[in-house]
Each structure stands twice: as C-alpha cells, then as structure tokens.
Amino acid sequence: MVRQNHRSKEDLRNLAGQTADCSSSGLRPYMPQLDGIRAIAVLMVFVSHWVPWTSQAGLPWGNFGVDLFFVLSGFLITDILLQGRRYIEEGGQGLFLTLRQFYIRRILRIFPLYYAFLLAYTVAVPSHADGLTPWLWTYTLNLFRVLVDNNWEGPISHLWSLSVEEQFYLVWPWIVLLTPRRLLLPVFLLSVAVGPAAKLIMAMYGLPHEAIKYFTLSRLDTLAMGGLLAYAVAQQGLQTIAKSRAVDGLLWIGMPMFFAVVGLRVAGIESANWMVLEMSAETLFCGWLVLRAAQGFGGPIGRMLASGPLVYLGKISYGLYLLHKPIPYLLREFGVDVDSIPPGIDFLLYTGLAIVVASLSWYLLEGPINELKRHFPNRTRIVGATVTDRQLAVGTRE
C-alpha cells in the first residue's frame, strides 16, 4: 500500500510536469512572481491615496496599479476559461457545467469579503454610505461615478474598480466559451480596441475625464489585453510568446509613450488626449509586465517579485485593496487626529494597519471560504487520469 501511494504521488508529479507549459492545456505551475505583481499594484494604489503630492505632481500611481490589476485579472481569468473551453470541445464537460463552476468559484472568492465589508462599513459610518446602497450592492459604483457624480471621492470610492471587474466577469465567459474558434483572435483584438475607441468617443462628446475613466467599456482594453495574452499563450506556449518580438513591442511602445505623457503633464503641458494615450500606454506596458512575470523575471527583479513579503502581500491583495482606503476616515471617526501624523509616518501606519486587517480577513474569512472551491473544481483529464486543481497547482489565485 505504501509503495502504491508513493507511485500515485509520483505519477501526479509527472502529470504536473507534463502540463507545466503545455500550449493547449492552459495549466501551469503556480507562478509566485504574479503575486509579486499584485503586491506592486496594490502598493501603487496606496501611494496614490496616502501620498497625495505624488498624484498632484501628475504621477498616475493609482491608475497604473488598477490597470496592472485589470491586465493580470484578464490574463488569469481568460486562461481558466480557455481551459474550460478545451474541456467542452473534448467532450469532457458541458457548457453550463463549465459556466456554473466558473461563477460559483468567482462568487466564493469575491462576494463574502465584499458584502461583509459593506455591511460592517454601513453599520460603522452610515453617513458615508447614504444614497450609495443600490450602486454598492449591485457592483455598479463605477456607473454612479459616470452618471451621477464624476468628482465624488470618499472612503469607499475605490470600489468602482471592483464594479468594472464584476461586470467583465458577467459577460466575458460567454464570449470566450461561445465564440467560434476561428473568430476568437479577431474578437480578442476587437475587445482591446474597444477601450481606446470608447475613450475617444466620450472625449469627443465632451464628457469629463473622470466619467471616461470609470466607464466599463473605456477600461475594457486592459482586461481584454490580459485575455489576448492568455489566448496567445494557449496557442503557442508561454515561453514562445514571452520571448516574441510582439511582446517586446508592448514594452518598447508602451513604456516610452507612458513616460512621455507623464513627463508632459508634470511639465504642465495639458491636453484632452493625454488620458487616452496614457491609459493605452499603461495597457501595453502592463501586458508586458504580466507576461514576463508569468514566464519569470531573472536576476534581482525576479528575486524581488518572488520574495516572501511581496508574495504574501500578493496573496492578501484583494483584502488590502478592498479594506485600505477607509482606514484614515475610520481613525478620524474614532477620535484620532490623523492630520497631525507626520507625512511618511502616516503612510507606514496606514499600510501596517491595512496589512493587519487584510491578514485577519484572509485567515478568518477568505481562506476558509476559499477552501470551499474544492467542491467545484475545474477538472482536467490527462492520459486517462483526473487531476483536480487542488492537486495540481495552477498559476493563479483567482
């Protein structure tokens, strides 16, 4: 029996090795550098919220961090969906089973903490949630910022980005799973093009930058860019795509364009077109970052992204993002004179508190609920064996 169990584990490891970079499977080993990317993204958002002079100087830390989250999310979610599509095409499972598993796993990952946070926040400071309840509880806060109040800012205003992601999750699986195979690439390319087109059209009609920035279609290019990269990896393999000239082009076009636009803004040269160019450049640059981190950076950058502290922050990044912004407001509500805290010290204090709260959230709520996903696995049939995603580490925490 011991020998049989040993052989079973060895067979499982062999199966995992066979799928490590299989272009058709969509399965890859856990990629810790992607958690490092998550940590970098959330720390950028922290800087934008708690070191205000950087944003006032024209440095778009927050927007870049959100775009990085969007591209990474589009990449990982599309990878899962393409894997599910392959199961359907091979006759391993039906469309509605694949959709059911996807949506249940998304609900288990996202809803519990989000709604627990809304409930706790509404009870703690009801005045800050007045009039927002329908938008908050239906994941449409971004549309509130487009249709009702473009300039509204507050302790929960950052939840707009979660609304964009949930709207994307609602529609994107149907597109990936139902589009005929010959049309998949054109659909991915068209989806990427929708973002800049939506921004330009809205700008032509004189809509304010804030409205454009929060509209779902104007952010579709970032999410779809991740999807396009996942499709390319599924077709050609991760190593081939990561080393291709097309991916190098994402860097050498996106990075100079991004720094040029930021430099012009910092210099005080403003234009209505800067936002469109800046966000398009961010999409390209973030696409390169995500794909290279999936492949694995070498040297100091790779060691930094795979370091224990960044990987841990990446693991709890959902809680960090969701729970961080109200911290100064809540401290003020409970009598703390946050305005007297020296600059720099306040950033460290708020970041430390965010890590504590997000860690408690992970170990007391998110982690245990996440374990329920084992009842709704994405199953993979390989060489007559069945390997669940609990047994075979996939390169995602999605």
Image (tube, rainbow, N blue to C red):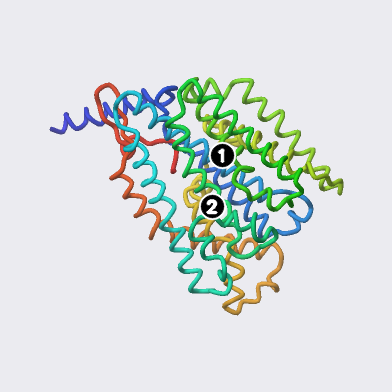
In the rendered image, the vertical position of residue 340 relative to residue 213, given as above or below: below
Q: Quadrant of residue 29?
A: top left
Amino acid at circle 1: Leu
Amino acid at circle 2: Ser
Q: Is residue 301 left or right of residue 58?
A: left
Q: Earlier in the sequence, mark 2 or mark 1?
A: 2
Residue beneath the point at 68% across and 48% down: 212
Residue beneath the point at 30% across and 44% down: 374
> In the displayed image of the protein, which residue is found farthest to the left?
1
- The residue indicated by pointer 1 is 223
- Which class describes the residues within 10 Å of circle 1: few (<14), some (14-19), or many (20+)? many
Residue beneath the point at 51% across and 63% down: 134
In the rendered image, the vertical position of residue 180 relative to residue 64, given as above or below: above
- The residue indicated by pointer 2 is 163
Q: Position of residue 234 (x, y in %)?
A: 47, 25
Which numbered dot is residue 122? none
